[in-house]
Image: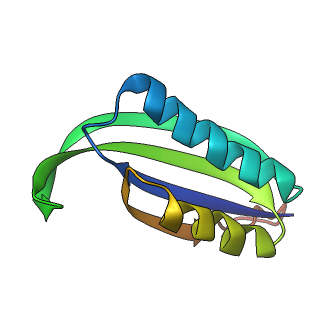
Amino acid sequence: MRKFETLLLLSPELSAENREGVLSALTAVVERQEGVVTAVDHWGMRDLAYPVHKLMRGYYVRLEYEGPAALVAELERNVRITDGIFKFVTVKLADEEAGEVA
């Protein structure tokens, strides 16, 4: 299984319960697609470099998960239709190899 990481920028106007609801819904999407969430890092409220939806603050969350490549398409589809998520970026993490280090 491949490892992926998705960084989410959530609305600062979401309450803690709503944030957890959004994250649990995204976690459920990963599990439905035969993936495993390995880490959920709450980076917290941060100032933004430029306004996003006329707001200068946002709540950052990093999801790390493993699964098939089709999982990313389904997760991003759900992210796009979920209210309260301003921006996101997904990257494939490097595979760890048991080779020698130069």
* 21 w.r.t. 53: above or below: above
State the residue at coordinates (38%, 50%). Answer: 84
The location of residue 90, given as percent across then percent down, is 54, 68
In the picture, measured across the screen, residue 7 lies left or right of residue 35, that is left
- The front one of 100 and 2 is 2
- The front one of 42 and 83 is 83
Is the N terminus in the top left, top right, bottom left or bottom right quadrant? bottom right
State the residue at coordinates (50%, 47%). Answer: 62
The location of residue 93, given as percent across then percent down, is 64, 65
The location of residue 80, given as percent across then percent down, is 49, 67
- Residue 100: image quadrant is bottom right
In the picture, measured across the screen, residue 76 lies left or right of residue 30, that is left
The location of residue 28, given as percent across then percent down, is 74, 45
- The front one of 80 and 36 is 80
For the rendered model, the colour scheme is: rainbow
Is the C terminus in the top left, top right, bottom left or bottom right quadrant? bottom right
Please, which residue is most extreme toward the top here? 17
* 9 w.r.t. 96: above or below: above
- Residue 45: image quadrant is top left
In the picture, measured across the screen, residue 62 lies left or right of residue 55, that is right
State the residue at coordinates (56%, 70%). Answer: 91
In the picture, measured across the screen, residue 33 lies left or right of residue 24, that is right
State the residue at coordinates (10%, 58%). Answer: 54
